[in-house]
Amino acid sequence: MARILYFDCFSGISGDMALGALLDAGLPLDELTRALGTLALGDAHVHADRVLRAGVSATKFSVHEHAHDRGHEHGHHHHDDAHDHAHAHRTLDEISTLIDRSGLSAAARERAKAMFRRLGEAEAAIHAMPVERVHLHEVGALDSIIDIVGIAFAMEWAAADRVVCSALNVGGGMVQSAHGVFPVPAPATLRLLGDAPVYSGRVQKELVTPTGALIATTFATEFGPIPAMTIERVGYGAGDRDDPVTPNVLRVLVGREDGVPRAAGDRVTVIECEIDDMNPQLFGVVMDRLYAAGALEVFYTPVQMKKNRPGTLLTVIAPPARSGELADVVFRETTTIGLRRADVDRECLQREIVTVETPIGAVRFKVARRGGEIVNAAPEFEDLAALAREKQLSVKDVQAIAIAAYGART
């Protein structure tokens, strides 16, 4: 019984709209704030407020920063407004350091860093400069960093087996950016959208921001109409403007397949190759680039090759629509001269993140179900390690306390 999450982008998508929609669909604000860690302390604080957009009740997620470090409050959908706040310009290395200060799981931290890498590569390509020299403008402001780190956590919390996105209403008109006035979609947005289906509707303003394009193309493995599903939760995330005719909201639908007929959405492509002649330092970069290009999983396995040479088997699990782009990354970034591709069926358990209060503090558990029955519940290792440090206990003792607390729940 696969869990489906559907982004309905009839009025575009931005970082704050995506977080607002997931908060509206049940993501607890206190868990999100905890995951942001020190990102949300000192320099900024986050809010989730109920607002109306063309009469529709929605959640508005916003970041309030101290004046010394203020990009525009990530209002997205308001590049046309006159904001005179100075943008914070940060490099990818500086942003990676900030992400490491968050309370995300290791996997979500890597996903957030890979998302920023994609942003940096898009900017670098547009401005014909090396990615190391790129200073991210609007998306380098603290509020955008909070959006991307927050969405990495929120999507892990949602634990969807399958993420589908509608065609994206990109809006129209012109947009003011740090580099001048551009037609909508802005160049970075257009590059990040790739081959996702887009259209321009009645509202002639910027509706899809670079962060929104990044979220849609990072997490969605399919684009199209609402899949056959039983809807369990609906969330509405508000943009800044209140358009009188079209609700300026992103709608998120969460539900289950329940055995209903569908297109082969749980097909994935496996890309493999063996490598025995590459500098080992490059393997870390290769993994980062593959995740940035949309890989679902990347892993390395030691193998013995011809002439008994030790080598490494590179395996990439990819959405079928991304397999060509990911094969390009493998050929560009490694020394292989060939690879194999195969489409396979994937079955995933329905997962959700549950917070369990223990005698020494809160621990998140990843709970997995099959056919509605719980088959596995595992504490998040980062939470165990953090509590072990704080309480000066061994990690295995904290793990035993957490598992006992989970078992004692009524």
Image: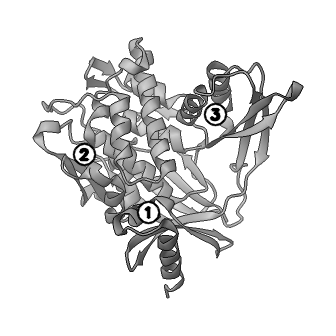
- Label 3 amino acid? Arg
Disc 3, disc 2: CB below 8 Å? no
Question: For numbered disc 3, what is the local secondary structure?
Answer: helix
Q: Is residue 132 shown above or below 218?
A: above
Which residue is at a point 43% across and 53% down the rendered structure image? Answer: 153
Q: Which mark is residue 240?
A: 2
For marks 1 and 2, the one nearer the N-term is 2
- Label 1 amino acid? Asp
Q: Is residue 162 left or right of residue 268?
A: left
Q: Is residue 381 left or right of residue 282?
A: left
Q: Is residue 27 shown above or below 331?
A: below
The quadrant of the picture occupied by the N terminus is bottom right
Q: Which mark is residue 133?
A: none
Count residues near mark 3 (Cα–Cα under 10 Å), then give few for <14, some for 14-19, many for 20+.
Answer: some
- Label 2 amino acid? Asp
Q: CA distance from mark 3 to mark 1?
A: 33 Å
Q: CA distance from mark 1 to mark 2?
A: 35 Å
Nearer to me, 75 or 130: 130
Identify the image quadrant of residue 338. top right
Q: Is residue 405 left or right of residue 301?
A: left
Between circles 3 and 1, the one closer to the viewer is: 1
Residue occupied by mark 1: 383
Residue occupied by mark 3: 322
Q: Is residue 139 left or right of residue 301?
A: left
For marks 3 and 1, the one nearer the N-term is 3
